[in-house]
Image (cartoon, rainbow, N blue to C red):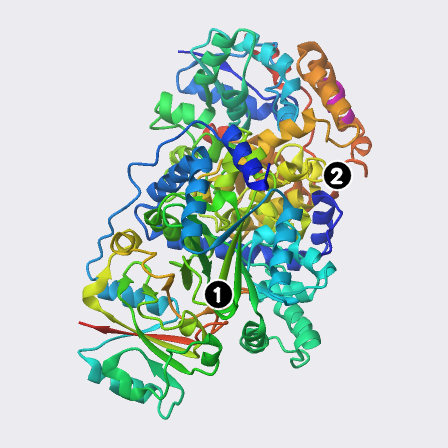
Amino acid sequence: MNQLNLDHASAAVAFNKDEPRVDWHDETLWFVRTKRDRAAAQLPEWEQLREAASQIKNHVLSNMHDLLAQFEENAKRNGITVHWAENADEHNAIIHKLIQDAGVTRMVKSKSMLTEECHLNDYLTRHGIEVIDSDLGERIVQMRKEPPSHIVLPAIHLKKSDVGETFHEHLGTEKGATDPQYLTEAARQHLRDTFLTRKVALTGVNFAIAETGGFVVCTNEGNADMGAHLADVHIAAMGFEKIIPRAEHLGVFLRLLARSATGQPITTFSSHFHRPRPGQEMHIVIVDNGRSRQLGRPDFRNSLKCIRCAACLNTCPVYRRSGGHSYHSAIAGPIGSILAPNLDMKLNADLPFASTLCGSCSNVCPVKIDIHDQLYKWRQVLMKEGYGPGGKTAAMKAMATVLESPSLYRMAGKIGRGVLRFTPVLAENRFNPWYNQREMPEPPAESFRDWYINNKKA
Amino acid sequence: MKVGLFIPCYIDQFYPKVAIATLKLLQNVGCEVDYPLQQTCCGQPMANSGYEHLTGGCNENFVRNFSGYDYIVSPSGSCTLHIKHHLHASNESEASSIRSRIYELTEFLTDVVKVSSLKATFPYRVGLHQSCHGQRGLHLAQMSELMAPPFSKPAQLLNLVDGLDLVQLDRRDECCGFGGTFCVTEEAVSAKMGKDRVADHLRHGVNYITGVDVSCLMHLEGILKRANSAVQVKHIAEILTATV
Amino acid sequence: MTSREKILANIKANQPDLRPLPEQYTFVSSFPDLTKQFIDVLTFVGGRALVVPDYAAIRADLQAQYPNLTSVATTIPELADLADRTMDVSDPHELADLNLAIIEGPIAVAENAAIWVDEQQLPQRVAPMITQYLVIVIRQSTLVPNMHDAYKQLKVDTTGFGTFICGPSKTADIEQSLVIGAHGARSLTVYLLP
């Protein structure tokens, strides 16, 4: 995939060059947020459900070892083969081997953010395996050689005219076609043929049940089911944090997931896989890839509670106005910004700063991850570890020196106000981004402190 | 009750009129107010930039200035929240006590003073910008994301002002995009967020935009001025002390 | 050390002290009329619901909805005369040209119009997705208020596969425009028997 090498701020500048398109992107995602609000408002117990989900996940984090062991034992008993992958490479290699063992060179795959995180498609393509993503949005971005820009709505950055052009090129639809019904029908026909001809299908995992050794996959399109039920080999890939203790806990999560994601009462299909069908092979790949490290960071382990609903993306005013690709990471938005530094601090040091810390993300999170607090805490870790931009530390030290000293502060204030008052042109220069689209306040003649001393007696 | 007035650095330097209005407002409702003269900054500019470890000097200075008051009150949700969450000092028991005694102005008026009437008149259409740190951090108002009964401490006070017409915005608590150093490090998104926030207020025909945080208002004012708009910003303290 | 051992050892070393499961994780939903709630939600998600007195009414409606349709299969003995083929095939690919599947749903949920089906109802797992049109017959007496109630009644691993189906397959991946009929069935009709 084309990994953008721009940092978030630079990518956001590029995204904001087309303001009407930014408005469209913002409105589209805000609409999803309002649908979520309406769906949540219909459940009087919404906030209690979030609390229950959060506590179940807290338990899961604290009991991870035993739950995974229990899951493995039960899954094996169910006839599912369980694989463990320490990192992305091992995950990719295991899947490659399973495809080779099946004696094929093609695979159909439904949505899995984990395989995006591991860059599975790149890996398999390099090794001569053709992968077709079957979620409509993922298929669209795959044809365009782009990564998904959103967890749940992978092609949300594209307009229907963009999709029309892509399908004209790849599926031979009429030039200039923009009708979503027509375009979706074309994809349906194309992918139906794929489902019917692929012997290996990969799906993600939304929830894995320790008690029963099965797993749940949720889709609206039915693509995970079409792939898995028609394939000889079904591979399910999961980050180990997807585990939940018992099937009855699904009541909590399935009530929250789709309502948080798109405002639907539940996804069209919530499929529970427990055993392969006769003659089929079923494999689960349980992946770590830095998760056990994150589990050991008390400030950041809660990020592993995420159920990938993307509510935090939809509500994030920065995400809506910078687009998913500006996050240059498999998972965009606020949740991505607290997950990515664990994978690579240097590459992702900019992401925790791509936020105003407004806190809306934490409030919509169905499992109550303290996302904005973690963004703040990652900033502290990253700057202490020396991943700040050049010169920032020196500037911050200078600022601290002035602000902690009452006399230096007052002197700087006098100079600052004086400079602004008499020579506004000095501050109003191209080196200060504030002035690109904003004015500064009129500097007053005296500070409040000066006024207070002069007027206190009066 | 003895109140220590905490005036954040940028208000002291750029918006003394907000500090003056805050002082008057507190005195009007019967508080004995003192302004410690050696105060500077809460340390938030460094902390939000990832340099909380450089805020020790600001913290010590804050504790030196604000020990001994019954309450510490500030016309800023953001700076109040920073002190509440992050003030630590060599005298940790005093720091901890300050963390529990600091209030943002409007919550102090509604929750401690329990103001039920104000002698203020402001015959204009006003839009309230719910600054995030005050709202989501200090719970000054119900958050639109939560499925819980609505309330708003700033709106409760604004509704006590004669003639004031408080408008309902399309997005009642969307962030304005100021975000501290975010306003320059992420200038493109910050300015776009500010423009969108201003547009929501303008769509509803406001004469004034008010709020509990001057930093957000400074950002919105900068955008209004660049657009040569006649709409002005006023901190809530200025409106709550306004007379015809 | 295998990857399995390494991962589990790292997890054991890094996981926090045990925290209990919450005491409350099921909630009561009270709807004045479960059938109405189910129908409202199913309609909202693009499905069609019809309260019927008996199989004769179902047959009549199906004949009106799908006149002269071929490649129809059902697992319901009372409607067997409508079928011209079976879903009980050894290779699921044989269902590629299935037009209409008529199946039963043993439990349905009023809060979200989700209907549970598993391999007791499905001769092939792919049947409700691969068919062009899907019909599910449920009984109003099996409606439960919410998902907690459904999971209390269900044993999810009784068979190797089970799924909650809520409405026809759909997508909004092109500019958030809702399109019914993504990869699964293009329509879902639910008949509610007493």
Disc sitting over residue A309 in the figure: none
Q: Which residue is drawn at 30% across and 77% down?
A: C75
Quarter of the picture containing the N terminus of chain C is top right
Q: What element carries label 2?
A: helix
Task: Decide: few, some or many residues near mark 1? Use Cα within 10 Å; few <14, some 14-19, many ≥20.
Answer: some
- Provide residue A238's location: percent of width, then percent of height: 52, 50
- Percent across and percent down for residue C36 are 24, 66
Looking at the picture, tell me which residue is in the foreground, A53 or A165: A53
Q: Which of C88 and A374 is in front in this view?
A: C88
Of callouts 1 and 2, the N-terminal one: 1
Instruction: Locate the C terminus of chain C by quadrant.
Output: bottom left
Give the residues drawn in magenta, as a range. Answer: A414-419
x, y (%) of residue A63? 43, 35
Confirm or deny contact between disc 1 and disc 2 (CB under 8 A): no
Q: Does residue B133 appear in this view?
A: yes
Kind of residue indicated by mark 1: Gln
The picture places residue A126, in percent across and down from the top left corner, at 74, 59
**Is A417 included in the stretch rendered in magenta?**
yes
The image shows residue A96, relative to residue A163, as above or below, that is above
Amino acid type, residue under disc 2 in the picture: Pro
According to the picture, the residue beneath numbered tag 2 turns out to be: A433
Q: Distance between the residues labelled 1 and 2?
A: 60 Å
- Residue sitting nearer the eye, C141 or A118: A118
Q: Can you tell which quarter of the image residue C164 is in?
A: bottom left
Q: Name the residue under label 1.
A: A280
SS of the residue under disc 1: loop
